Amino acid sequence: MSETSWSEKLLGGFRKTSDRLGENLSGLAGGGKLDDATLDDIEDALIISDLGPSAASRIREKLAEKRFGSEITTIELKEAVAEEIAEILRPVAKPLEVTAFPRPQVILVIGVNGSGKTTTIAKLAHLFTEDDYGVLLAAGDTFRAAAIGQLATWAERAGVDIVRGPEGGDPASIVFDAVKQATDTGIDALVVDTAGRLQNKRELMDELEKIRRVLGRLNPEAPHDVVLVLDATNGQNALSQIDVFKEVAGVTGLIMTKLDGTARGGVLVAAAEQYGLPIHAIGVGEKMEDLRPFDPDLVARVIAGVA
Ligand SMILES: Nc1nc2c(ncn2[C@@H]2O[C@H](COP(=O)(O)OP(=O)(O)OP(=O)(O)O)[C@@H](O)[C@H]2O)c(=O)[nH]1
């Protein structure tokens, strides 16, 4: 797909978020002077658009610093907000790159059930194979038989192999077999699915710890990435998931899914501002091609309603 149609797709996907902030900002400036009352309203508009209090107050301060007292139209205001959002997003935009030496790069994918983890793993496999990397998947979520089956179906669609075990099997032993197979067959990236039982933090922590121990024995650098998948429709709840998973799993980066069809995409900015974790990619649909590298400038313009 061409870049133009990708940005159109992204725009379409983000339309609800874009409309929400766009509408919330409209009518706030209207050619008048940027004074304290208007800045208050702008800050409120940013908060109710899910950007969070911290990003909202930072954007307010920047706007005040650069434009206080000057006349500003609605479109100028949206452009200025887009620039400040981009300032927040640029430092965290970091594609997931296959650089591990020796191979394979081991990417542990974590997140609560339903966040889009399985689909995202398949989409990642697709992105990597498009770049000619050899990919292997490991079905480390043995808690639910359906999860193993779903991952196997996606693996077939993506044209990659999968290492799987029985329902209730030991995830660490599957990961062990997967690393051995990946090493023996010269695989570049091993993507590991994990269970997302947040309601039982202790068990989840023990399970991830055990996977890490096994990985560490085979390769002290592994896992190279611990990617947390977040569902944007959860809004501020997605942020509390970052807190929990940081504690249990040592997150190294984020992928936010379901940015199509939600008005809560502003939470991406809140996540970037509050945690500063790399954002690798965004999910804008259910199909294999619907995972996009994170383009901070485009996303900022879409969120502010000027793209
Ligand atoms: N609209 C949209 N739907 C998505 C996106 N990513 C995933 N989904 C859908 O979200 C639902 C859950 O996705 P899964 O990948 O099964 O989620 P999971 O986290 O693996 O959940 P379990 O399979 O329950 O462990 C599915 O219906 C997906 O098609 C996205 O970016 N946009």
Image (spheres, rainbow, N blue to C red):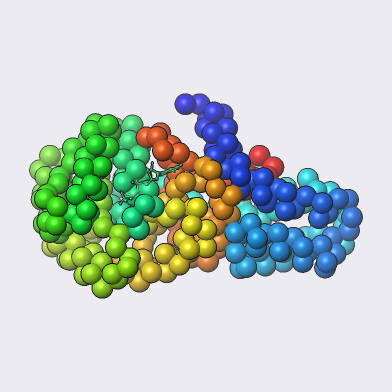
Q: Quadrant location of the C terminus? A: top right
> Which residue is nearer to you in this view: 105 or 32?
32
* Left or right: 223 in relation to 263: left
At x 80%, y 48%, the residue is: 74
Q: Is residue 43 above or below residue 304?
A: below
At x 33%, y 55%, the residue is: 113
At x 66%, y 56%, the residue is: 84
Q: Position of residue 161 (x, y in %)?
A: 18, 37
- Tell me, yes or no, if residue 250 can be seen here: no
Residue occupying the far top of the picture: 2
* Left or right: 82 in relation to 265: right
* Left or right: 68 in relation to 254: right
Q: Position of residue 228 (x, y in %)?
A: 37, 57
Marker count (numbered): 0
Q: Is residue 47 above or below residue 231?
A: below
> Which residue is nearer to you in this view: 277 or 22?
22
Q: Position of residue 210 (x, y in %)?
A: 17, 66
- Tell me, yes or no, if residue 164 can be seen here: yes
When asked about the image quadrant of residue 19, the answer is top right
At x 26%, y 73%, the residue is: 202
* Left or right: 78 in relation to 8: right
> Which residue is nearer to you in this view: 210 or 117?
117
When asked about the image quadrant of residue 216, the answer is bottom left
Q: Is residue 101 above or below residue 10?
A: below
Q: Position of residue 289 (x, y in %)?
A: 40, 33
When asked about the image quadrant of residue 108, the answer is bottom left
